[in-house]
Image: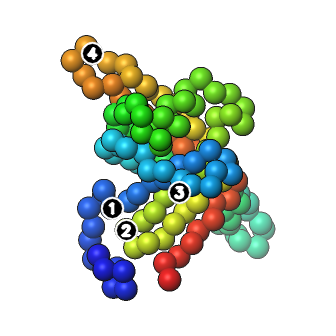
């Protein structure tokens, strides 16, 4: 898509892009060989039933979090892939990264100090290509930057 053309219509899922860096790192890198992703938006919802509502519930969203599940192949030597795979045995703040999700329309959602939960790394049948599967869990409010 040309730089100054406003985005409209449909898009292939691969136009979503992810980049990762160590917390506070200057340069974020793509994560090579990723094949699919899913996103879960979770909300904390407070409910109450005041007398004046005559039995009807009132609700308000009071908390949010995002979990991005990514599946692909382990690619040793790729900066982003190595960074994620290296979190498999990490605990505490060592299991955190800065993570950007860029949408096809140019919107960027940046997660500072996101938690990495590596769920598969290099395992499988002898004839399979080793997987790299992980979750990125938001850790506080992300920054959303809309396209200019």
Residue behind mark 3: 100
**Residue 15: numbered disc:** 1
Name the residue nearer the viewer: 131 or 24: 24
Label 4: how many Cα within 10 Å (few below 14, some 14–19, many 20+): few
Residue 12, visible in the rendered structure: yes
Residue behind mark 4: 125
Residue 101 image offset from top left, x and y in percent:
49, 58
Alpha carbon separation for disc pair 2 and 3: 13 Å
Label 3: how many Cα within 10 Å (few below 14, some 14–19, many 20+): many
- Name the outermost residue toward the right: 51
Label 2: how many Cα within 10 Å (few below 14, some 14–19, many 20+): some
**Dot 1: what SS?**
helix
Rendered image quadrant of residue 133: top left
Residue 19 image offset from top left, x and y in percent:
49, 53
Alpha carbon separation for disc pair 4 and 3: 32 Å
Label 1: how many Cα within 10 Å (few below 14, some 14–19, many 20+): few
Residue 40, visible in the rendered structure: no
Alpha carbon separation for disc pair 1 and 2: 5 Å
């Amino acid at each position: 898509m040309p730089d100054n053309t406003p985005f409209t219509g449909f898009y292939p899922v691969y136009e979503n892009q992810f980049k990762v860096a160590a917390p506070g790192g200057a340069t974020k890198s793509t994560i090579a060989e990723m094949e699919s992703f899913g996103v879960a938006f979770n909300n904390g919802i407070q409910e109450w039933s005041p007398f004046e509502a005559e039995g009807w519930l009132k609700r308000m969203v009071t908390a949010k979090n995002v979990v991005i599940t990514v599946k692909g192949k382990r690619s040793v030597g790729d900066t982003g892939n190595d960074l994620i795979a290296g979190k498999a045995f990490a605990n505490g703040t060592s299991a955190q990264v800065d993570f950007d999700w860029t949408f096809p329309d140019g919107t960027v959602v940046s997660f500072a100090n996101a938690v990495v939960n590596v769920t598969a790394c290099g395992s499988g049948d002898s004839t399979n290509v080793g997987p790299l599967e992980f979750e990125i869990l938001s850790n506080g409010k992300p920054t959303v930057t809309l396209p200019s």
